[in-house]
């Protein structure tokens, strides 16, 4: 329906690989984009960031990482609210000599691009400290980082719940801490960040987490609505076209 202009966006909680394959076959990628990348907002302090790829491409060339950076920069900029988002490459260290060859080559490409504000390498912990607005990596690295962070968040939430139910004293502490805990939960609730975009396709396709509840799926629908209204695929096409000229 998206390919036939009968719908402005598609949202699915089904198989990620199948969704990407259908999206690429039916919608195609824009000229200059080899493969779509999975992208979503990641919570951080003091600000959230955009991260891609989160699992669509297990291995990537340096040129593909540059393509991801260009698309992520358009995603993060919004409606010109942020003209030059800070773009970083996820790596095992911040030194120029660290990392695999394709990551080091990608760093050179990003540094030389006049369309990007490249700030260098970023380590895993920097994702959540607001050190960059866009974090770029291959799909293997991104998916592992995402799932690890979700696991830590779940562990902390379950530990706090267990602690505040352990004794009458801790239940009393939990009662008075409830407003703060609710505020914390609202800020970092995974459902609030549900809805990952397949950037690079000639249409809006959003992947919802398979285990998302109604609130989480509503967030995925909101992501689809926002990107359709912003005409995000068209904006990405324009940026890539500028780079190719």
Image (cartoon, rainbow, N blue to C red):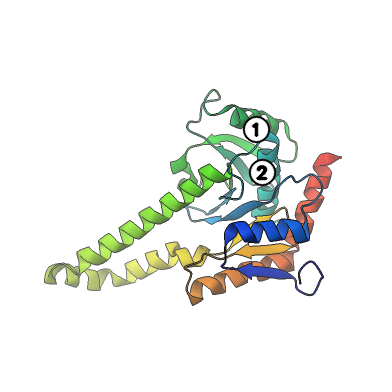
Disc 1 element: helix
Q: How crowded is the residue under tag 1: few (<14 C-alpha within 10 Å), some, or many (20+)?
A: many
Q: Quadrant of residue 183?
A: bottom left
In the drawing, what numbered circle is on residue 69?
A: 2
Say whether residue 81 is visible. Answer: no
Position above or below: 70 against 97: below
Find disc 1 in the rendering and name its residue.
Answer: 106
Disc 2 element: helix
Could you say where residue 144 lies in the image, as x and y percent from the top left? 47, 47
Quadrant of the snapshot with the C terminus = top right
Q: What whole-number distance in Å separates the C-alpha atoms at marks 2 and 1?
A: 10 Å
Q: Residue at 50% across / 71% down in the picture? A: 216
Say whether residue 242 is visible. Answer: yes
Query: Does residue 198 appear to the left or right of 48 in the view shown?
Result: right
Query: Does residue 81 appear to the left or right of 5 in the view shown?
Result: left
Q: Quadrant of residue 174?
A: bottom left
Q: Quadrant of residue 243?
A: top right
Foreground of the two, 9 or 127 = 9
Q: Residue furthest left?
A: 168
Could you say where residue 215 lies in the image, as x and y percent from the top left? 49, 75
Could you say where residue 148 lies in the image, as x and y percent from the top left? 41, 50
In the drawing, what numbered circle is on residue 201?
A: none
Q: Residue furthest top?
A: 97
- Asked if the residues shown at circle 2 and circle 1 are in contact, with their CB atoms under 8 angstroms apart, the answer is yes
Foreground of the two, 204 or 183 = 204
Q: Residue furthest bottom?
A: 214
The earlier-in-sequence mark between 2 and 1 is 2
Foreground of the two, 83 or 105 = 105
Q: Residue at 71% across / 63% down in the picture? A: 204
Foreground of the two, 60 or 241 = 60
Q: How crowded is the residue under tag 2: few (<14 C-alpha within 10 Å), some, or many (20+)?
A: many
């Amino acid at each position: 329906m998206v390919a036939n202009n009968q719908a402005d966006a598609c949202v699915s909680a089904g198989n990620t690989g199948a969704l990407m394959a259908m999206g690429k076959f039916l919608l195609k990628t824009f000229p200059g984009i080899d493969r779509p990348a999975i992208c979503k907002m990641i919570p951080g302090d003091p600000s959230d960031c955009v991260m891609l790829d989160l699992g669509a491409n297990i291995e990537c060339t340096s040129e593909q990482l540059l393509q991801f950076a260009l698309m992520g920069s358009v995603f993060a900029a919004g409606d010109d609210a942020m003209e030059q988002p800070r773009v970083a490459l996820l790596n095992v260290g911040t030194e120029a000599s660290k990392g695999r060859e394709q990551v080091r080559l990608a760093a050179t490409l990003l540094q030389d691009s006049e369309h990007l504000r490249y700030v260098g390498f970023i380590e895993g912990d920097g994702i959540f400290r607001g050190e960059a607005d866009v974090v770029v990596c291959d799909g293997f690295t991104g998916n592992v980082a995402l799932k690890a962070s979700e696991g830590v968040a779940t562990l902390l939430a379950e530990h706090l719940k267990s602690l505040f139910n352990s004794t009458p004293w801790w239940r009393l502490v939990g009662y008075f801490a409830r407003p703060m805990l609710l505020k914390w939960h609202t800020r970092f609730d995974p459902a609030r960040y549900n809805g990952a975009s397949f950037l690079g396709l000639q249409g809006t396709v959003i992947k919802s987490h398979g285990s998302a509840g109604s609130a989480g799926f509503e967030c995925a629908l909101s992501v689809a609505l926002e990107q359709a209204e912003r005409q995000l695929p068209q904006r990405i096409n324009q940026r890539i076209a500028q780079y190719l000229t």
